[in-house]
Image (cartoon, coloured by chain):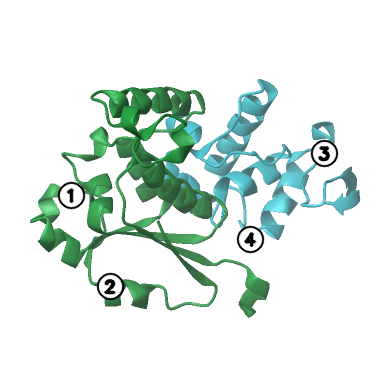
Amino acid sequence: MEKIIAGKTVNVNEEGYLTDFSQWDKSIATEIAREEQIGDLNEKHWEIINYLQEQHKNEVPLSIRKIGKSGVVDIEAFYALFPQGPLKKATKIAGIPKPASCI
Amino acid sequence: MNEYNGEIKKMMIILSKASLENVYAAFILANGARMEGIEAEIFFTFFGLEAINKKKLEHLHVATVGNPAMHIPTMLGGLPGMEALATSMMKKEMEKLDMPGVHEFLDIMKASGVKLWACKLAMEMFHLKKEDMYDGIGGILTVGEFYKKSAVLGSHMLFI
């Protein structure tokens, strides 16, 4: 379905995840972050978002364990930066699919 | 169940067993809750204490006796080495799925904000001290204290 985010019409699924990454840009990320009550994105947020997008591009399945070993952020800080479900929120902001991981 | 339309806000998990399949069930449920933004706490009691016992936690086994899902006769399950074999097979499969070992899993849960509690009575029964346990546990609680921690709307309790 279509949704207007940051003044742009984008395609999202029923949970609000972008279905076409080419429609993603930083203003969309900023607005989703606000909607998800993450607030303003700082440098560390962007670093994680870039990392997640890179992993997704390389078709690496995402998990909390992998994030912890990424060297980008440790698990505790990841939870602090994206409270209330960090992996699902961070991927939503990054414009990539919600990971189907339980770990 | 009507509060928050039945939405789960907190999972209170009681782990009373030390076989690997039960320990992982508890850990995955707790960690999975945190991943969804749900609070999670685990109360380790009776044999469940082995999962946070420093000396034991890396040596937990899959149960091969009395476990019909193993699809081997119970008599064979009791033979020496069977548990070790089944355990090493299961660990290999879990590694393929990127599942951490018990110690690393405890570290992940701790970092994710899962609260880990040891049962006071069971600690006394097995003559265990806090120093014997994984460093990341929140403390030693009575049943009553654990119940108090679940006193929020949307709290659910699970016994494994």
Q: What is the distance, in whole Å, between disc 3 and disc 1 at their CAs?
A: 46 Å
Q: What is the distance, in whole Å, between disc 1 and disc 4 at their CAs?
A: 37 Å
Residue pictured at 43% horizontal, 30% vertical:
A69
Q: Chain of mark 2?
A: B
Q: Secondary structure beneath disc 3?
A: loop
Q: What crowding class fits label 4: few (fewer than 14 Cα within 10 Å), some (14-19), or many (20 or more)?
A: few
Quarter occupied by residue B122:
bottom left
Q: Are marks 2 and 3 on the same chain?
A: no
Mark 3 or mark 4: which comes first in sequence?
3
For discs 1 and 2, the disc positioned in front in the rendered view: 2
Q: Secondary structure beneath disc 1?
A: loop
Q: Which residue is mark 4?
A: A37
Residue pictured at 64% horizontal, 79% vertical:
B2
Residue pictured at 52% horizontal, 54% vertical:
B33
Q: Which mark is residue B133?
A: 1
Q: Chain of mark 3?
A: A
Q: Secondary structure beneath disc 2?
A: helix
Q: Decide: marks 1, 2 in contact (CB < 8 A)? A: no
Q: Decide: marks 2, 4 in contact (CB < 8 A)? A: no
Mark 1 or mark 2: which comes first in sequence?
1
Q: Chain of mark 4?
A: A
Where, quadrant-wise, is the C terminus of chain B in this rendering?
bottom left
Q: Which residue is mark 3?
A: A19
Q: What crowding class fits label 1: few (fewer than 14 Cα within 10 Å), some (14-19), or many (20 or more)?
A: many
Q: Which residue is mark 2?
A: B143
Q: Decide: marks 3, 1 in contact (CB < 8 A)? A: no
In this view of the protein, can residue B139 be seen by the observer?
Answer: yes
Asked if residue B30 is positioned above or below residue B74 in the image, the reply reads: below
Q: Chain of mark 1?
A: B
Chain painted in cyan in the figure: A
